Image: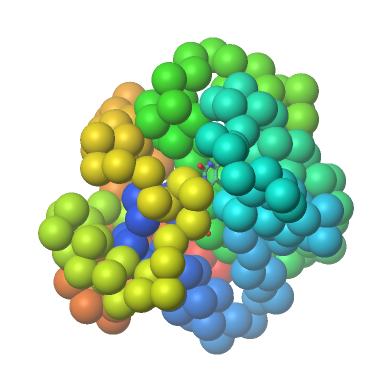
């Protein structure tokens, strides 16, 4: 039994990651592999509970929310549980894992957006998840106007505590993602996400082709 592959999808708000995770999983299943689709923060009961704390705040706390360090620790704790309980076991039994966000979201949001150093985020990941990394990270990039239009539809009922941060925060996030992809080309594939879902899916399949099993 060979182990599965771990593919993460990354990008800012409204990049279309969830749709693309589903389309990629369907394509992989058509090639005959078992696929687990999951997300961060979340993916296990414990990590989903932490997701609620992060995105909705602690019950009864109407204040400013988690400080940037507490926020980074909570993301790292959620990831630790997710890696240990869901991702590693799935890979070990030969399943592929497609994950909507992973470590690079912490580097971009808590680091680029929130001002923590990249070294600190990586230290938290070393402690929480022993530095575990995806085989491939797909960075889906969309123009800010396209992302805003998609978000207006998605978030008509209100946004969460992180998605609702100001434009300058999200611009720093996008800049950080782009810099990681630029500096770590062996780990990232950059995907233009401005077209239709099918067009982006085709680009993702092309980027993932070296990993894919032959039908
Ligand atoms: P989602 O809406 O894509 O599911 O992600 C939830 C929010 O959490 C989104 O605004 C990005 C943010 N986030 C971080 O700030 N750091 C992280 O490490 C992860 C995984 C997500």
Q: Nearer the viewer, residue 66 or 89?
A: 66
- Front residue of this view, candidates 60 and 132: 60
Depicted 138 relative to depicted 157: above or below? above
> Which residue lies at the image location 47% right of the left edge and 46% below the top edge?
162
Query: Is the N terminus in the top left, top right, bottom left or bottom right quadrant?
Result: bottom right
Q: Residue at x 24, y 43 (%)?
A: 167
Position in image of residue 44 (x %, y %): 79, 59
Residue with the most extreme bottom position: 30
Compared to 48, does 78 lie above or below? above
Residue 189 in percent (x, y) is at 35, 47
Residue at 42 percent across and 34 percent down: it is 108
Where residue 201 appears, as percent x and y from the top left, is 34, 73
| Residue 32 as seen in the image, left or right of residue 81 | left
Q: Residue at x 44, y 27 (%)?
A: 114
Residue 205 visible somewhere in the drawing: no
- In the picture shown, does residue 132 fall above or below 142? above
- Residue 43: x and y in percent read 72, 60
Q: Nearer the viewer, residue 72 or 18?
A: 72
Asked whether residue 56 is in view, the answer is yes
**On the picture, is 94 further left or further right than 214?**
right
């Amino acid at each position: 039994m060979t182990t599965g592959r771990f593919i993460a999808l990354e990008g800012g708000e409204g990049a279309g990651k969830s749709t693309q995770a589903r389309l990629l999983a369907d394509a992989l299943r058509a090639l005959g592999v078992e696929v687990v689709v999951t997300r961060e923060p979340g993916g296990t009961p414990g990590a989903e509970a932490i997701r609620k704390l992060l995105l909705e705040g602690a019950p009864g706390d109407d204040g400013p929310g988690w400080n940037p360090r507490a926020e980074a620790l909570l993301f790292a704790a959620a990831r630790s549980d997710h890696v240990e309980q869901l991702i590693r076991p799935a890979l070990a039994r030969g399943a592929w894992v497609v994950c909507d966000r992973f470590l690079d979201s912490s580097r971009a949001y808590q680091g680029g957006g929130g001002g923590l150093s990249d070294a600190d985020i990586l230290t938290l990941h070393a402690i929480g998840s022993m530095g575990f990394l995806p085989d491939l990270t797909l960075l889906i990039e969309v123009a800010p106007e396209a992302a805003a239009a998609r978000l207006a539809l998605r978030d008509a009922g209100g946004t969460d505590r992180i998605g609702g941060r100001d434009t300058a925060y999200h611009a720093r996030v996008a800049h950080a993602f782009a810099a990681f992809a630029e500096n770590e080309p062996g780990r990232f594939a950059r995907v233009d996400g401005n077209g239709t879902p099918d067009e982006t899916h085709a680009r993702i399949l092309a980027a993932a082709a070296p990993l894919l099993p032959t039908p």
